[in-house]
Amino acid sequence: MNLFLNAVSWDWVIILFDDNRQIIDKENISILLQESSLLIDIIDNFLAKNKLKYSEIQNIVVVNWPWSFTWVRTISLVVNTISYIFENVYLTPISFFDLFKNYPIIKASSKRDLFVKNDEKSIIEIISIEDFLKYINFNWIKDIFWEGILWINTINSIDYINFLKEVRLDNKKTIEAYYVKKPNIC
């Protein structure tokens, strides 16, 4: 069995899928704040509900960026610890942007700025909320997958079934906390 975990959104998703890439169970979890203390309990409860132990998991596909500096570190710490304790558990880190096929993608970064990826090969840009208004005036934007401040639910925009069929499992034992921008530490 394998787990998929997207905890870099306001709505988290955890999915159990088998080696044939069939979804066994899926749970959407709405989070008001980024309560990092809930992550391990959510995983524990999800496995218990499906009568599974960590030792029965082969791979955790984890969306580990972009999001807040602290939260990206927390996600990496949790899944790295699981992989360290259970030697049969491997990790596959992915970007939130890997979940989509249509571009541009705009993802909340903070209360002041946004992450923008214009196409599959472009680098991630960081733009201010004010500059976002300029983006939406361009004719070439047809679909915007947006989450955060304007609050359009991205859970319904992501085709998890097809994504899980196509994702390549990396089988890493550790992942790094990846940051698109420098931490906002005073």
Image: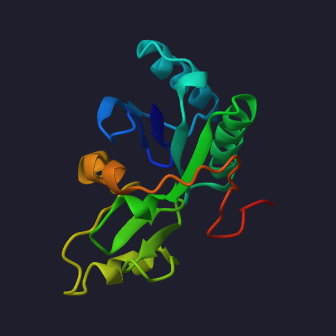
Tell me if I can see residue 108 in this picture: yes
Identify which residue is drawn at 52% across, 62% down: 109
Query: Count the marks: how many?
Result: 0
Image quarter of residue 34: top right
User: What colour scheme governs how the chains and residues are painted in the rendered image of this protein?
Assistant: rainbow
Task: Locate residue 57, reporting x and y percent.
Answer: 54, 30
| Residue 184 coordinates in the image, percent (x, y) | 71, 62
In the image, residue 39 above or below residue 151: above
Asked whether 123 or 147 is in front, the reply is 123
The residue that appears at 61% across and 42% down in the rendered structure is: 90
Residue at x-position 44% and y-position 74%: 116
What residue appears at the point 65 percent right and 70 percent down from the top-left corner? 181
Q: Position of residue 99 (x, y in %)?
A: 37, 58
Q: Quadrant of residue 40?
A: top right
Please name whichever residue, 174 or 78, is drawn nearer the observer in this view of the structure. Answer: 174
Q: In the rendered view of the protein, which quadrant contains the C terminus?
A: bottom right
Q: Is residue 16 left or right of residue 85?
A: left
Residue found at the far right of this picture: 186
Relative to 174, is 30 above or below? above
Whether residue 153 appears in this view of the structure is: no
Q: Residue furthest bottom?
A: 139
> Which quarter of the rendered picture does the N terminus lie within?
top left
From the top left corner, tell me how far across and down residue 166 is, in percent.
34, 57
Left or right: 4 as drawn, with respect to 103: right
Q: Nearer the viewer, residue 87 or 105?
A: 87
- The answer to whether 6 appears left or right of 162 in the picture is right
